[in-house]
Amino acid sequence: MAGRSKSLDGLFRPRSVAVVGASRRQGAIGRQVVANLVEAGFEGPVYAVNPKTKVVHSMPTYASIGRIPGPVDLAVLVVPAVDVLRVAEACGRKGVKGLVVITAGFREIGGEGVTREKRLLAIARRYGMRVIGPNCMGVINTDPAFSLSASFSATYPSPGAVAMVSQSGALGEAILADATASGIGVSMFASVGNRVDVTAADLIEYWEHDDHVKVILLYIESFGDPAHFVEVARRVTRHKAIIAVKAGRSEAGAAAASSHTGSIAGADIAADTMLAQCGVLRVESLRKMFALAAALLHQPVPKGARIAVVTNAGGPGILATDALSGCGLEMAEFAEATTAALVKALPAEASVQNPVDLIASADADRYRASVGPVIRDKGVDALIVLFVSPIMIDAAAVAQAIVDEVQGTGKPVLAVVMGRSRGDEALEILRRAGIVVYRYPEDAAATMHMLVERGRMLRRKPGKRPRFNVRAQGPRTALRGAKAGWLDSRRAEALLAAYGIPFAKSIRVKEPGDAATAAHEIGFPVVLKAEASDLLHKSDLHAVVTGLHTGDEVFAAAKELLKRLRRRFPDVTLQVQQRAPGHREVLLGMKRDPRYGPLFVAGLGGVQVEVLRDFAVRVGPIDDRSPAEMFESLQGAALLQAFRGDPAADLAAASEVLLRLQQLVDDHPRIAEAEINPFILAAPGQPSVAVDARVRLSE
């Protein structure tokens, strides 16, 4: 275990605990923390610190932490905010290794609170103390060797294999209560509050090599240091599942962005894609988080996305099928032997296709004769089995039949039990066998989708980051003397071209006659564009004219553009451009997010990009596998393949351009935003070229 993460032992594995601000008053947090430590059965000494009373919770108090005769590993601070710094200094002098600062009144109140929090961190760093909080609920470690509840939580969970982080104290209480209600045991829990020191990433790293922890659950509102989170989460998710509920899905202002990439790569997309790239499974609610955690703890990960459904009721089977299809999962196709076995076992009115409908009269024998062949079919990766319990059917016997048939198959099985006839006994049989039970088909389908995503992540092999030869002089020339803001199109094109990004041939002119001459030089047909410093979305102002086949047409179009636009854009000029020979348009872009770094975008391009909004986003760095995966994830991915006589688009060319764009923005941190739209793709082996691009610089 790394030194930084091992230093959290003082917080979670202390030999002694002091509660500074312990109280005799009923309902006081200082009293509840002491009571929780005692009632959880903490194995070491607990010291109550309160200079105004002699006894708290039947134990003598000390006037200050310095008066405690023995060593103190962990101090829980429940004192007024104005006293926290003084007490923290005393804890440092005492040799305390960990502080849990429950007190509020720090960064969350602004002003003086921000200053106070910075000073708290400085004190902790000076003495080598690790800090949870401030403004938090505390920490828990259910390991019987410690039995630590240094918190004011009303719930002390059962020991188990799940570790939890909550950024919210109030939600932390709900998380612990829901874990207990869901039958999920907890190894460790931390409410991190303002995260002045210890972050979610620190805790994930701490639990990385803890054999007691199998699954990590996160409720987070922000990441603190995203780079640290990415580094740790990418490593840990290779062998331990991490599930996150990330609050804050909306963000105002994306609609006002000046580029398509700016509007796409905003809001919650950066957080969502960052978690996905790290292998973290993001869910929308705490209920789904616990449902998924239970499945990951007890079921294997599927080897593919081919799902079978067995049911005794048509309606729930249809709901499950719709939900699975909506998640992008496949309904498995059965082998002939499987279908033959089902035909032999089921009545004529049953359905032997997926979903398999056993009809309402299905008993334990019928389930046994159906579930076995289905789960053993090589074309089935996972199974959802549904049972609506009629009063005349022995639900417990059905549950036992399901358990008997699926054990030892190495495939995940989820169950949906609806109805009440001997339902409790049936649920217990299934749960005891590690089969997670859901109330509704949609919940089982959502969990199955996340299990499949987990399997995909584990099977993905990391790629490489290629380096390309570039013209070093080109970027220096393009950026020389450039101010913050959007580069003019000539500079933007020169900058991108220096990194090997191909552009359609073009000539820039100022007058209609020169435009006609340029068109003859380039060769017809051509496209004519107006350019100006404030003219960002050309199509909105009809500043692009396509399909020009003669010099006269070019002259007339140029004259009309200049006349119409010069009053609004005094610096307007013209670009005469070769019509690109390709047949598909894509967008390739980058936006540098202040929290997450470069965000790369790939999607269907052209003027409809913000209407279609069919795009994929990745947080940099991306490897050589990422661009292809981005294009494959598009809803319109089929439009980039061969259809109706047109050849497939050269996605390899687009992928290389995105990787070259990454190298450009890595080499030049001033580039805040870059977009190539459209990049026109030809068939493989034919030239694919950019026809429009823009680049924005920061200060």
Image (cartoon, rainbow, N blue to C red):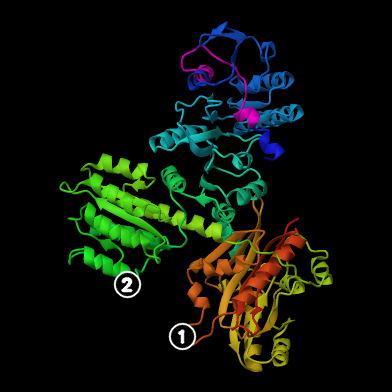
Secondary structure beneath disc 1?
loop
Residue 158 painted magenta: no
Residue 682 visible at all: yes
Q: Inspect the image, locate mark 1, and give the three-letter code of the amino acid beneath it.
A: Arg
Q: Nearer the viewer, residue 635 or 49?
A: 49
Q: Nearer the viewer, residue 77 or 606?
A: 77
Q: Residue 321: image x %, image y %?
A: 33, 61
Q: From what the image shows, is residue 695 above or below residue 453?
A: below
Q: Nearer the viewer, residue 693 or 557?
A: 693
Question: In the image, is 343 to the left or to the right of 308?
Answer: left
Residue plotted at (52% across, 71% down): 608
First in sequence: mark 2 or mark 1? 2
Residue 250 visible at all: no
Q: Residue 639: image x %, image y %?
A: 49, 77
Q: Nearer the viewer, residue 512 or 170?
A: 170
Residue plotted at (43% across, 38% down): 184
Q: From what the image shows, is residue 313 above or below residue 143?
A: below
Residue 26 painted magenta: yes
Q: From what the image shows, is residue 79 above or below residue 130?
A: above
User: Which residue, given by chain and number where applicable, does mark 2 sit on?
Assistant: 336
Q: From what the image shows, is residue 209 above or below residue 176?
A: below
Numbered disc in front, either 2 or 1: 2
User: Which residue, given by chain and number where applicable, does mark 1 sit on?
Assistant: 644
Instruction: Report the span colored magenta.
Output: 9-35
Residue plotted at (48% across, 27% down): 153
Q: For residue 490, what is the image quadrant?
A: bottom right
Secondary structure beneath disc 2?
helix
Q: Inspect the image, locate mark 2, and give the three-letter code of the amino acid beneath it.
A: Glu
Alpha-carbon span between mark 2 and mark 1: 34 Å
